[in-house]
Image (spheres, rainbow, N blue to C red):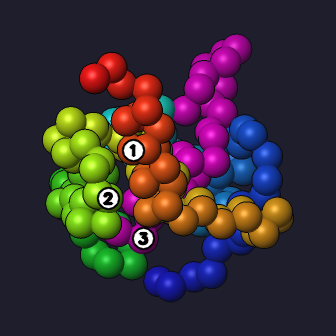
Amino acid sequence: MGTTLPSIPAKRYFTIGEVAELCGVKPHVLRYWEQEFTQLRPMKRRGNRRYYQHHEVLMIRRIRDLLYDQGFTISGARNRLQELAHPARDDSGLEGAPEAADFEMPSMLVDTARDLSIEATGFTLDSNAVRKELFEIRALLSPN
């Protein structure tokens, strides 16, 4: 399809209607994807109204790309998201850092760190630099 999606505004929560517009899918599709992709867990408030956060909008866009643009099946997209959340780690640039098996970053943080780019503030995130710094902080805090 290759449609250009609108930029994601810098706000904390999005309704299902807003997410549907930002991601180019209908609300019923989003509700279905919540059942199929366990990573999608919007906060629910009064009357089961869904409120999505920025990282969930990014994940929905990734799911949409896998399904609509790259031609994955639901099962294939689920597997691909798992691969992206837990890639083969290369710690060659992290001297003295703990082994990757000792530290697993939650998939939400991996996805957010990999994709976070908020156009409204011009802020971008270098996930490798953040990861290195997290390992250094962890080494300082862990008892020897």
Residue matched to label 3? 65
Q: Which mark is residue 94?
A: 2
SS of the residue under disc 2? loop
Q: Position of residue 113 (x, y in %)?
A: 51, 55
Identify the mark nearer the N-term, 3 or 2: 3
Residue at x-position 17% and y-position 41%: 101
Q: Position of residue 70 (x, y in %)?
A: 32, 78
- Please, is residue 3 above or below residue 58 in the view? below
Closer to the camera in the image, 140 or 91 = 140
Residue matched to label 1? 135
- Please, is residue 89 above or below residue 133 in the view? below
What amino acid does circle 1 point to? Phe
What's the magenta region? 42-66
Instruction: Using the rendered view, name the quadrant where residue 62 is placed.
Output: bottom left
Q: Nearer the viewer, mark 3 or mark 1?
A: 1
In the rendered structure, does residue 108 fall within the stretch colored magenta? no
Identify the mark nearer the N-term, 1 or 2: 2
Residue at x-position 43% and y-position 26%: 141
Closer to the camera in the image, 103 or 42 = 103
State the residue lying farthest toward the front.
144
Identify the mark nearer the N-term, 3 or 1: 3
SS of the residue under disc 3? helix
